[in-house]
Amino acid sequence: MEPLKICWVSSEMAPYAKTGGLADVAEALPAYLGSQGHDVRTFLPLYGRIDTSQGFTVVEWMVDRPLRLGGRTFHYTLVTDSAPGDHLQRFFIHCPALFGREAIYTGDSDEAIRFAFLAKAAIECCQGMGWAPDVFHCNDWHTGLLPLYLRHHYGWDRLFERSKTLLTIHNLGYQGMFPTSQLGALDLQGCAHLLYRDDLDAGVVGFLKTGFLYADLLSTVSRTYAREIQTPEYGMGLDGVLRARADHLVGIVNGVDYALWDPATDRHLPYHYSAEDLTGKLENQRYLLQATGLDAEPSEAVFGLVSRLTAQKGLDLLFEPLQEMLAGRDVRLVVLGSGESRYEAYFARLAQAFPRKAFFYRGYNERLAHLIEAGADAFLMPSRYEPCGLNQMYSLRYGTVPIVRKTGGLADTVQLFDPATGEGTGVVFEHQNADAVRWALTFALRLFGEPEAWRRMVTNGMAQDYSWQVQGARYEALYRAMANL
Ligand code: ADP
């Protein structure tokens, strides 16, 4: 089959610029596609924080190019850290006037202009290269205007005659809403009739919502989230628009980078293990309990939690049930995370109340995250909504039973264990209340008390494959279907 030409545009990409899961996908998916022989070119702003001192070169015929946006002319230079001819070429748009700041996202008055510029610059770079992508793969609100620009502002260019646009929603919580006073600066004054009338009347324009209207296809990072965001409960005001495009909205779960997250090779772990021999897991557990100062040898399970501490993650559902469990059962709890103060305060209080059973590390700590995945018996993810979620997939691979709420990617990747059939990979609860969590914790502890059942559930989980080899192939099929190739 013919290799595909994919133009990837995003505001984040690990390891250069990361605030969340989008960055990981932006690193791994293009890399997978390149490894399959496709011609993949990625475009990322060259933020001030990106160190270009090593391995970066200027693309010589793309230096100091003018780009007009909203009556202003900005100049940019294209920079790359890839070699010409590589299947994956990563390009960085160097425009100090807009991106020469430390932060990826800013509250600055030109925030909308920065990302409108990213979309236009990516298109113009393709023009400069005389390269017609089969698919422009856009991500989140930052690239939401690209499909409209491509069709309207660059519709004259026959180069893009066959190019299609895919817009992936990584988190609907961020929509890129700006006042209509910016329409001129975004080159949208002349095509206001192409924007949502209701929004214009309310004095706003939404990048993501506009993308929903003009992208050939929409996707999100799990099938369940794709369904959920079409409901008022999860749609964050955009469910109507998404329902209108339901036929063009698909869900593909993110892949896991098993080169980094595999207990058999994980460089952060003192002991390695696999499904065949779990002795190392127990050793990691002893190590974790000792390192966190908790009592050794619990007769019941060790629970782990690693998360941004925000409302999305449903941590308030745990408040009472965790306290009760720590008071009544011989369990341990290790929590890692930072975020909103009410959650930080809760976990700090819990650790204080149960100093030998509960530990809280406030902050970000890569190594501890790996240790918790390896050392815990069960992992808590009670999210109120979760577009995809990565930690539950790490947990599966690490033989750590995920206890999750049935939403988004959690619903798609964890199946409730049934002791009667021996099928299932975790504990799944539905309702957003403390009783549902109480049930889940009690059920998990019951299964933990039945070593054969527990072992079966752990082995089922460890056998799951959410690698990019599997998930990336789904994107390839999607691109081919879109491009009719
Ligand atoms: P989200 O993108 O909503 O934060 P995900 O589960 O998709 O949730 O991804 C979170 C990623 O960030 C995981 O790799 C997780 O291990 C990591 N992470 C979150 N908080 C911390 C922390 N405090 N320390 C280390 N890693 C963290």
Image (cartoon, rainbow, N blue to C red):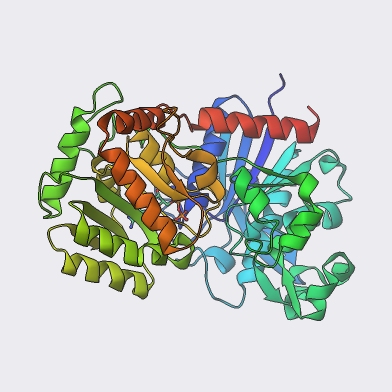
362 shown above or below 214 = below
Frontmost residue, 236 versus 128:
236
Residue 80 appears in view: no
Q: Quadrant of the C terminus?
A: top right
Left or right relative to 476: residue 244? right
Q: Position of residue 173 (x, y in %)?
A: 58, 64
Seen at 75% across and 56% down, the residue is: 242
The residue sitting at the front extreme is: 420
Direction top: furthest residue: 1
Image spot of residue 273 (x, y percent): 25, 28
Front-lying residue, 12 or 334: 334
Residue drawn 85% across and 72% down? 197
For image coordinates 47% across by 29% down, the residue present is 465
| Residue 313 rendering spot, x and y as whole percentages | 45, 60
Tell me residue 52's x, y (percent): 43, 51
The reply to whether residue 71 is visible in this rendering is: yes
Quarter of the figure with residue 281? top left
| For residue 411, side relative to residue 234 (left or right) | left
